[in-house]
Amino acid sequence: MESHKPRLDKREFATVLAALRFWQSKLGPDRYPAQARAHMDFEPYFEDGKKFAPLSKEEIDSLCERINTAEEEPV
């Protein structure tokens, strides 16, 4: 199967990583009530959890590590 990786410039790359870490900060029992409500704002992106579930904190760590160590450097 052919891979279709988007090419990101350095600014886009940094934004994607920051967004992942921001999302990660909204997960878990240690968040504030306002953060818990903010999490619900993103449910449409996950089709209300019926088709896709959001990544866990551990899965986000793994994804960020994969992105940071990718062979291809941001343009």
Image (tube, rainbow, N blue to C red):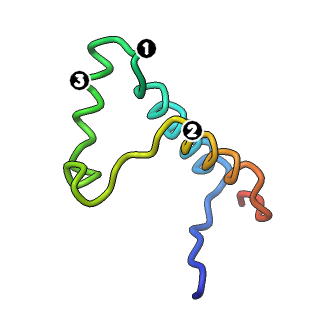
Going from N to C along the chain, the mark reached first, 3 or 2, is 3
Report the front residue among 10 and 65. Answer: 65
- At mark 2, the secondary structure is helix
Quarter of the image that includes the N terminus: bottom right
Q: Position of residue 40 (x, y in %)?
A: 23, 33
Displayed quadrant of residue 5: bottom right
Q: Name the residue rendered at 23%, 43% in the picture.
A: 43
Give the amino acid at mark 1.
Asp
Give the amino acid at mark 3.
Arg
Going from N to C along the chain, the mark reached first, 3 or 1, is 1
Mark 1 = which residue? 30
Report the front residue among 1 and 10. Answer: 1
Mark 3 = which residue? 37
Cα distance in 3D space between marks 3 and 1: 13 Å
Give the amino acid at mark 2.
Glu
Q: Position of residue 26 (x, y in %)?
A: 41, 26
Quarter of the image that includes the C terminus: bottom right
Q: Position of residue 37 (x, y in %)?
A: 23, 23
**On the picture, is 20 further left or further right than 67?**
left
Mark 2 = which residue? 58
Q: Name the residue rendered at 57%, 68% in the picture.
A: 6
Please rate how many residues cluster around mark 2, counting C-alpha atoms within 10 Å: few if below 14, some from 14 to 19, many from 20. few
Q: Name the residue rendered at 42%, 24% in the picture.
A: 28
